[in-house]
Image: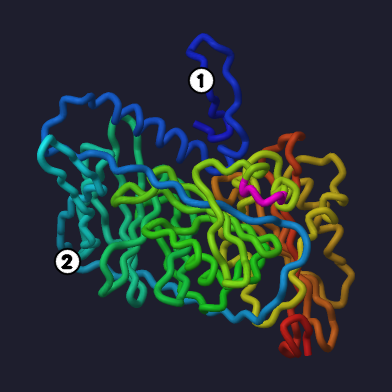
Amino acid sequence: MDEFEITSNPQGPDAPRQPLPRWLAILGAASVVVLIAGLIAWVASRGQDESADSLTAGEQTTLPVPIDASTTITSTSTSTTASTTTAQVTEPVSTTTTIIPTTTTTTTTTTTTTTVPTTGPSGELWTVKSAYFDKAFVMERSVTEESLTAYDGRVEQSGLVVRCVAVVQAGQEGWSEWCAGPTQAARFIVLEGINPWLVEVGEAQGDITLSQLDPTWSLLANGCVEPVVTLISAANLGPAVTTGMICVGDEAFLVHSAVFLQSGPPDGGGLLLEHGPEGWNTSGGGTSFPCENAIDDGVDRCVSFGVKYEMFEAALPIPPLSVVPKVTDFVHVRDQTVIVRGWVDDEIDPTVLEAIVIEQLVDPDAEVVATVRRAERLGHGQVNLVVIEVPALDDSVRSTTWAIWISTFNDDELDPITRAIAWDTCARGLADSSTCV
């Protein structure tokens, strides 16, 4: 089923069908909403006559929400390095773990609390029983890089297929987890102490790449100057992982994954962070976060984040390392969305939009021609990304880079330019946090 054709029909089968809210499609309706709806229906169908030793679903957890996206963001110096390794498979070793979310059962005389096992994946094969499925996930080791190992597995039940990736760190209890549809490609971030790792999941089973990045790595294309380690640490996501992010001024909005193999948020969610005198702190969040009432502080985040209904509309996926250049020294990170929207008039076709943007920024007769990189249908297929690095031919500033996110919805009610961020890269280093040498 195409995720943009999902409909909602709360009034019954005979009522007119209404389109699913766009923010749900942006969050990933096909792989999240339908997934949860199927699970809820399945759990309900089990009835109340289960045996005493059957698994029960834990309480769903919701978390706080995101940031704005327009105006200036402070600058810093960033250096990144990436390494990618695919592990060789040795003789399989199978282990089995049964995961039971934290639950409390009360009788007339006693109260019993069941805690979640903290033992994580090991060996080549790992079988884990989720509380949401009768069948177990069979997780196969996909890749090992330094102290991290990624396991990939899926389960099918009553026509519902779910894929989960577990990332475990050697010597540490538990694991980080991402769950979604069976063939969904995605990128997410896990932390190993102060080291961020980018996990790239392909559509095929076992297609996973682990890339370690420098602790100062920032998602400039998402408008974020602050290192991702700082933001994700402040979010305190537990076993969930960061799948998207947007930064505006002193606020950031993070999107996190669904969790099925252990106690955690089975429906994913979003979290708003604010930077204050004590650093970054969470301000609220959940599976729905209307921008108009995000926080009762008088700030209209529909305006500051440039969205209509939900904070999730503002979130941007994690971009590929191959598309966003690895910056050493950058300054003047700024939101250029309004400027770029002024170039495109009423055009909504993504291919035409990209051509307009390139025509505006690339001079084919320049002494040094601009570099153009692109990625299509990122996240849940909702955006294309074109990154254009324009040489400055200056002793101080080497280039100006534009990261322009283009909607694939082809809907004249949506702004076709989702977001446009620009920054300058210094040629000889930084004189201070906002000035090139």
Q: Where on the picture, by quarter, is residue 348?
A: top right
The kind of residue tagged 2 is Glu
Of circles 2 and 1, the one toward us is 1
Q: Residues within 10 Å of mark 1 (few under 14, many from 20)?
A: few
Query: What label does residue 10 carry, if any?
Result: 1
**Is 136 left or right of 316, judged from the image as shown?**
left
The reply to whether residue 217 is in sight is yes
**Which of the two discs, 2 and 1, labels the residue nearer the N terminus?**
1
Q: Where on the picture, by quarter, is residue 139?
A: bottom left
Question: Please, is residue 61 above or below residue 209 in the view?
Answer: above
Question: Please, is residue 345 above or below residue 38 in the view?
Answer: below
- Magenta range: 294-299
Label 1 residue SS: loop
**Is 65 left or right of 394, judged from the image as shown?**
left
Q: Residues within 10 Å of mark 2 (few under 14, many from 20)?
A: few
Q: Position of residue 381 (x, y in %)?
A: 58, 45
Viewer-side residue, 320 vs 49: 49
Q: Find out whether residue 426 is within the magenta segment.
A: no
Viewer-side residue, 195 vs 153: 195
The kind of residue tagged 1 is Pro
Residue ID for mark 2? 91
- The residue lying at 80 percent from left, 82 percent from top is 397
Residue reaching furthest front? Answer: 109
Q: Position of residue 28 (x, y in %)?
A: 52, 42
The reply to whether residue 221 is in sight is no
Q: Position of residue 255 (x, y in %)?
A: 52, 53
Label 2 residue SS: loop
Disc 2 from disc 1: Cα separation: 51 Å
**Is 264 left or right of 24, judged from the image as shown?**
left
Question: Please, is residue 267 above or below residue 255 in the view?
Answer: above
- The residue lying at 76 percent from left, 34 percent from top is 412
